[in-house]
Amino acid sequence: PAWGIALLLLVVTSPAEEIFWRGVVQRSLMRKLPPFQGFFLAALCYAGVHLCTLNLPLVLAAFMAGVFWGGLYIAQKSLVPVIISHALWSVTVFLIFPFG
């Protein structure tokens, strides 16, 4: 089962989340708002969807990850490094250091 979860995180979940959050949400917000505001709001929204977990460390980690991945997307102008980073993070968090 752990390999199945890892494969799902690597192949489906991380790419889908990054295409949506950075490729659609962040890019759209940065076009409609001053770029920094759009970038920051996208990170807040990304963290916000994690509120349903009621896990404050996870929400804070999601915000920091959203800031990091958003900045990486701006710097690299590509989703590829962001997807790779997100996939590595997800596997680490969910399989190696799972939150309580």
Image: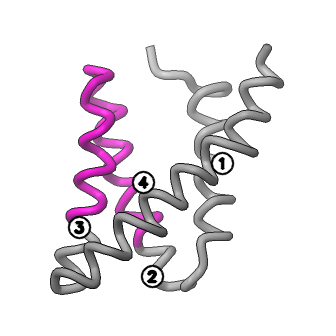
Q: Residue at x 50, y 75 (%)?
A: 73
Distance, label 4 to label 2, CA atoms, is 14 Å
Q: Amino acid at mark 1?
A: Ala
Q: Residue at x 79, y 35 (%)?
A: 7
**Pointer 4: residues within 10 angstroms few (<14), some, or many (20+)?**
some
Look at mark 1 in the image and give the residue it sits on.
87
Look at mark 4 in the image and give the residue it sits on.
65
Distance, label 1 to label 4, CA atoms, is 12 Å
Task: Name the element at disc 1.
Answer: helix
Look at mark 2 in the image and give the residue it sits on.
74
Q: Quadrant of residue 37?
A: bottom left
Give the magenta-colored segment's residue range: 41-70
Quadrant containing the C terminus in the rendered view: top left
Distance, label 1 to label 3, CA atoms, is 22 Å
Residue 64 is inside the magenta segment: yes
Q: Residue at x 46, y 21 (%)?
A: 99
Q: Where 45 falls versus 33 (above or below)?
A: above
